Image (cartoon, rainbow, N blue to C red):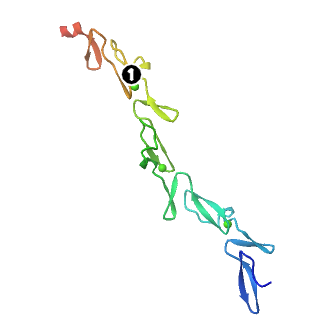
Amino acid sequence: MDGCLSPTICINTNGGFTCECQTGYTLDGSTCVDVDECLDDNSFHCPESSSCENNEGSYTCRCDAGFIKQRGTCSDVDECSDSSVCPANSTCTNNVGSYTCPCDSGFIQDADSCKDEDECTDSSVCPANSTCTNNVGSYTCPCDSGFIQDADSCKGKNNLLLL
Ligand SMILES: [Ca+2]
Ligand SMILES: [Ca+2]
Ligand SMILES: [Ca+2]
């Protein structure tokens, strides 16, 4: 034997040599096998919001979903910096590890999109003597024929003339 088999390293000794395992490997019988550092909490050091991932000879720290590696730590990704991340008629709200897309006022969640809320399905939304008219993002309450708008209600034209 005139050398050491990879991944062992050769250590010269007085009049000969011995073979030792490289860092990250451990002797298993006569061969060096990878150490799974991730199995032992004392063998790996990963930043918060990441997990240990074993590899041949060493290990890496993979940031959790929603986090990105920055200067050795895992920082929250601001998904809202990409304006296409949320559907139309919603507002992106970043949070640590994720984000949400609450629908704007006047819109309701429909699967992955925000659709117009038909406010007129609620008969109490408009005052008496008016007809609810739905539109995208809102609704109107035009007064019925013979009635005119007075603050938030519709009053008979004749009543108003008497005032
Ligand atoms: Ca390893
Ligand atoms: Ca985030
Ligand atoms: Ca509407």
Label 1: few (<14), some or many (≥20) within 10 Å?
some
Which one is nearer the viewer's eye here, 90 or 128?
Answer: 90
Which residue lies under the disc numbered 1? 134
* Corner quadrant of residue 19: bottom right
Question: Can you say whether 127 is above or below 30 in the image?
Answer: above
- On screen, 158 above or below 3? above
Q: Circle 1 — which element? A: strand
Ligand 1 location (quadrant): bottom right
Residue sticking out furthest to the bottom = 15
Q: At 43% across and 48% down in the image, what residue appears? A: 82
**Location of residue 58 in the rendering, given as x and y in whole percent from the top left corner:** 64, 68
- Quadrant of the rendered image containing residue 33: bottom right
Q: Is the C terminus in the top left, top right, bottom left or bottom right quadrant?
A: top left
Please tell me which residue is depicted at 29% across the width and 20% down the height of the picture: 152
> Looking at the image, which is closer to me, 89 or 152?
89
Residue for point 40% across, 29% down = 106
- Quarter of the image with the N terminus is bottom right
Q: Is mark 1 within 8 Å of ligand 3?
A: yes
Tell me the amino acid under the disc marked 1.
Asn
**Horizontal and vertical percent position of residue 80:** 43, 47
Q: Describe residue 150's horizontal placement relative to residue 22 as left or right.
A: left
Whole-percent x, y for residue 162 in the image: 18, 7
Left or right side of 45 for 121: left
